[in-house]
Image: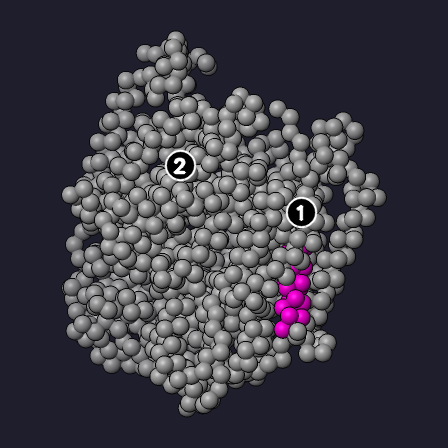
Amino acid sequence: MLRTLIAAGLAAAAFAGGPAAAADQGVTDTEILLGSVIPLTGPPALLGVAHTTGVKVAIAEANAAGGVNGRKIRLIMDDDGYIGARTIQATRKLIDVDKVFAIPGQSGSGQVLAAMPVLDKSGIPTIASVGPVKGMYEPPHKNIFAVGSSYEEGIRVLVRFLAEKNPGKTWGLITQDDDYGVAVRDGFDDVVKEKKLNVVYSASYKRGQQDFSSEMARLKDAGVEVFLAGGIISENVAMVKELEKLAIKPVVGIFWPGRVEAVLKLMGPASDGIYAVDYVEPFASPAGQAFLEKAKGLVSEAEFKSINRYTMAGYAGARVLIAAMTRCGRDLTWACTNREIEATKDLETGVMAPMSFGPNVRFTNSKLQVMQADFATLSYKPVK
Amino acid sequence: MRFLAEILLSGLAIGAIYGIIAIGFAVIYKTTGLVNFAQGEIAMIVAYIAWTISTTLSGNVFVVTGGALVAAVLLGLVIERVVMRPMLGEPVFSTVMVTIALAVILRSSINFIWDAYPQALNLGVGRDIVRVGAVGMRTGQIAVIVMLLALLAGFWLFFRYSRYGIAMRAVAGDDRTALLMGISTGRVHAVAWAASAAISGIAGIFFAITYDVSPAMYEIGLKSFPATILGGLDAVIGSGFGGLLIGVAENLAGGYLGSGTKEIAGFAMIIVILMVRPFGLFGQRDIERV
Amino acid sequence: MRSGTYKETYGELIALTDSRLVWFWGAALMVVLAAAPYLVNAYVLSLMTIMLITVVGALGLNILTGYTGLISLGHVGFLVSGAYGYAVVVSRWGLPPLAGFVAAGVVPAALSLVVGAPSLRLRGLYLAITTLAFAFIIDNLILQAGPLTNGARGITVERPDMLGLSFASDAAFSHLCLAAAILTLFGTLNLRRSRIGRALVAIRDNDIAARAMGINLNAYKLLAFVTSAFVTGIAGALYGINLSYVSVEGFPFLLSIEALAILIVGGLGSPLGAILGTIFIMLLPEVTGSLLRLFGTQAEALFSTGAQELKSTLYGLVIILFLRFEPGGLVRIWHDVRRLWVHWPLRF
């Protein structure tokens, strides 16, 4: 045992080399190496692959334009399967072994929170564009920048909108039993207090649950007229199809993690008129079409097929990083990049509202818009 | 009253899917003495194959199910021949771990071959809603309950009257004696795996018709464990009824006790049942000699 | 040079080792492991830390599954309850970390009585699936017990300060894990050679015969459950501290499977096997990952998004191949190699 262990130990030591080098690791004369830890396996790959495609679009765009001050960008990815412990490991690996220069987009919300100490300590420029939550930007960390809007704020905007449109109705809510669900519930409760909504049904489900018949039966029994479906993809599909079966038609609102065009097809005609909220443009808008047009020429066919709203989020985040690196000139360092990301002012990406950061502002808090599903064209259209 | 009827009916519908998968578990356990942890994954793969056939070749329900079931049988045979047969004679623990590793492989093959998007399995049937009074059911849900009952009847006849069924019972009872009686254990195992894969495939297709195919679909395997435990791991027919019981119990819990209890109702139930009957409701007590 | 083994007393039979050389190399390894945090980079250090934590958990499971032969698929339930035991006591109640570690052991131990008692009548796979059910129920209880556990929000945990030492740095924390792993290793080794250990193994080999020899099955099975859960709970607390954030999500069912894979690949029932298995299973994804990368970015592009799935496929494949070709596990390979080394050129 001992001999092998020692051998393994020595091998590990040899393989490890010295501690992390200076701040400009990952940059050569011709190349900048970026790396993301993102879920690429299992169901969460739905967001991970799409998000990565967005980052790739931004990178391909920059490389096609001659790179960042003459350096081409290369991206490597590592999978964490949406498990926090692996996010920590993979993030350490990106920083210490692969020696990437920056992280343009990092795994989901709980996962980034788990990797926060690692990111914070290293000082590597990091864009968190998958699931921005409070812990990422409050208190502000000098090198971690959240792109998007918070779950709580998103829900508040959606619920306020629905409440104004449907005054005096009864409400129902179902959320997932994790940090995402908690955020949705918090946002919802804020508006319930503010607008004194009459909530007649409230429940949470276990992540991965597929059958929602008893939940929907109770929802029907309680006489819910406005229903906020806090599932992600298949959960929302199952809930809406169940409502169809039970022959009730409450006003339904869904949230951006589930705002994927494919969902409408799965829900069928019952999806028509569902409300959603998001900070990135719907693909049906001119801006969305322009983005698809741009992406078509820059990524492979398989990657193009993976595109959904997370692609835009990933694209926007990577654009922030690339713009900051460009402003740094040839002397590309972490300190400069962090400074320049902080100095980002009204960056226009075409996929969401102009983004800005500032001293102690580590969150774009992007403008939200409410949209509505149109089953005939399988798309979401902005409502005003 | 309407509420109760809705809860019970949807409980039966999901329970029938658990039941069919539980039959798949029991068929393998009865002949080989191990629990196949890849059962849910096999159901998922077969459903994905059905989806591929329906989107590329033909959406005809008979072509799709026929093709998918042939694929399921082949999958079962390949697994048995390549993975499981070399493990004959190894401790149960090792063979069970092999099925777990197999589950990992099959699970990752989904994203490898297909993608992470949920897809609708549209066969033109099974999605319509039938209403009796105020209570609605999808035709696919009714069909799956009928399917379960048909399978149960079929298995009862098979084990009682068919030569092969009797051979399987013999192998399950004592494989060495069965061997001496001129029964090919290997062939019985192969048939068991093929049958079990096809049965799970049926469950997978029915599940996909109602709930779509997605890479998370394999979890129905996990959720069907309580059914087969409740019925008895070696009780094919008991497992089928176990599924119905678990489905109804889950939905009653979800309907009356509230959220959260639903997903664990089945598991809580088997703990209680096993305290009273350690071999399931219909399982046989082993007699062991030192 | 040694030439064969001759044991003349019972004392020799149950001694930890008959060779001073083993003690020497063992001590040398400890020194290397203790010095390693200052020599390797942060990534290797974190890999080492997680491996040490996993060793504790695997040794814990080994008591129940390896020694006593009771298969548990629900060990992640003990892991998560240990983590919560620590997190609630330390982060929410503000008690000292030492009390947290006590709670991390005692809470799962108490729970193990609840699951162990009804399981006494169950055998084999029935037991396995009951423990699986237990793991699901624990998750649900934690989520329901919001006032105590903070529900789905989870609890943030800091690295501990205890016994006058700070374990805040990565190096210090890895030392804490190393200490836990060494303590557990000696604990389980000594347990194995005590009266209790022999009773547990007798139950594994044939419980009816064991009972005939006067072993109280219920008492010893419960004892195995309690000890195993206690040790696993400690591992859970360390795992939670390493994550810096304890939530149900951080403890997926996969961990139960991984723990069993570790035992099987390492060699069931052997603490050394648990260690070798941990090293193997934890390094496997790393090695397959770097192998894939060896083929270069072209291969990765070829598989496009499938490269990661290929990794898990290889993972499953290696486990199958192991079970198929070396069911005795790594520890058997190690013994064979050692025998070859000592007896070469003779076969035995």
**Range of the magenta residues?**
B3-20
Q: Say whether residue A224 is left or right of residue C177.
A: right
Q: Say whether residue B212 is left or right of residue C314.
A: right
- Residue at horizontal 63%, vertical 43%? B277
Q: Which mark is drawn over residue B31?
A: none
Q: Which residue is mark 2?
A: C227
Q: Is residue B266 above or below residue B259?
A: above
Q: Secondary structure at mark 2?
A: helix
Q: Say whether residue C56 is left or right of residue A338.
A: right
Q: Is residue C162 above or below residue B7?
A: above
Residue A121 x/y as whole percent:
20, 56
Q: Secondary structure at mark 1?
A: loop
Residue A68 x/y as whole percent:
25, 68
Please give the chain letter of the residue carrying mark 1: B
Please give the chain letter of the residue carrying mark 2: C
**Label 1 Cα crowd, 10 Å radius (few <14 / some 14-19 / many 20+):** many
Q: Tell me if residue A49 is in the magenta stretch.
A: no
Q: Amino acid at mark 1?
A: Leu
Residue C134 x/y as whole percent:
49, 49
Residue B268 x/y as whole percent:
54, 53
Q: Are marks 1 and 2 in contact (CB under 8 Å)?
A: no
Q: Is residue A76 visible?
A: no
Locate the C terminus of chain A and report the quarter of the image it occupies. Answer: bottom left
The quadrant in which residue B27 appears is top right
Disc 1 to disc 2, how far (Cα)?
32 Å
Q: Which residue is mark 1?
A: B281
Locate the N terminus of chain A and report the quarter of the image it occupies. Answer: top left
